[in-house]
Image: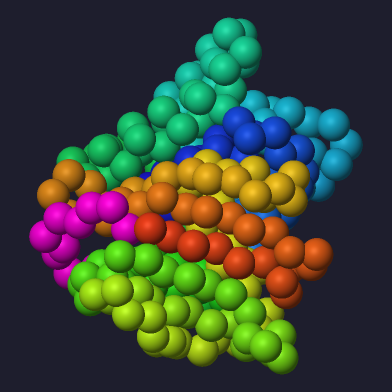
Amino acid sequence: MKELSLWLRELGLMLRNGTDLGAALSILECQDFEASIRTMTSKMIEQAAIGATAEEVIADQAEAFPPVVRFALLSGRAGGRTPETLVALADALAQAADLGMDLGIVAPDVTAEMEGGSGHAPLVRLVNKLLWDAAQQEATEIHIHTSEGRDTTCVDLCIGGEWSEVAQLPGDLLGPICRRLCIMAGINWVLKQPALGTLRVGERDTDVRGAVQFLPGESEAEHEVRVTLGGRGVRGEE
């Protein structure tokens, strides 16, 4: 349910920011979700391509989503608030998972997970780790950008007023990392305009909060993003 919660939240945020359903699902398909969820998303993309709505593609996945989710979406559609309903449902699923409730959701197919490809970069965990590590080092700002030769993604931290490079990642990760941070901050990167947003990782006293500044380049390889960390609780083990 934690994975489904994150999936619903990201879909809701993208739809709220004006992203087309098909494009939003294509982005989710490339995220680091379980193989069964990626397979489900692929089926949804095919349905969206022939005009199906968000409510319809989710309703067709009865084995993944509990009845309450599908019912709430129908109510949200009636009020024209599908994106907001998706985000609210994400919160509800996350809380149910914390309480140990299964809501009738079928467990993912372990065989499908084992056979699923591992080619997708673990973006969710990678970005969360970058944020947590920066907070633990008491950094005030994170700068993620391309190297001079545009073949490396550089991660710089500002600690005590001094900047230092803490990581060099493959160059092709820059775009996905920027998109992931934009999703977390509620920024519509599709517009390719400088934008600001806020993010939060964790809950209550174990969270990291920050302001995200997205600075788009001419291409994905030239994007950059700055995260100003604005708060941190006592973090438990990831």
Residue 152 horizontal/vertical position (percent): 62, 88
User: Does the image show residue 107?
Assistant: no
Q: How is the image coloured?
A: rainbow
Relative vertical location of residue 218 with respect to residue 51 in this rendering, above or below? below
Residue depicted at 47% across the width and 79% down the height = 155
User: Does the image show residue 149?
Assistant: yes
Residue 230 is inside the magenta segment: yes
Residue depicted at 44% across the width and 73% down the height = 126
Q: Is residue 210 left or right of residue 77?
A: left
Closer to us: 88 or 129: 129
Residue depicted at 71% across the width and 48% down the height = 193
Q: Is residue 223 left or right of residue 234?
A: right
Residue depicted at 53% across the width and 12% down the height = 75
Residue 60 horizontal/vertical position (percent): 65, 35
Report which quarter residue 140 is drawn in. Answer: bottom left
Relative vertical location of residue 233 with respect to residue 124 in this rendering, above or below? above
Residue 81 horizontal/vertical position (percent): 57, 17
Residue 43 is inside the magenta segment: no
Magenta extent: 229-238
Residue sitting farthest toward the right: 50
Closer to us: 196 or 63: 196
Q: Is residue 69 left or right of residue 194?
A: left
Main secondary structure found in the magenta portion: loop
Residue 145 horizontal/vertical position (percent): 58, 75
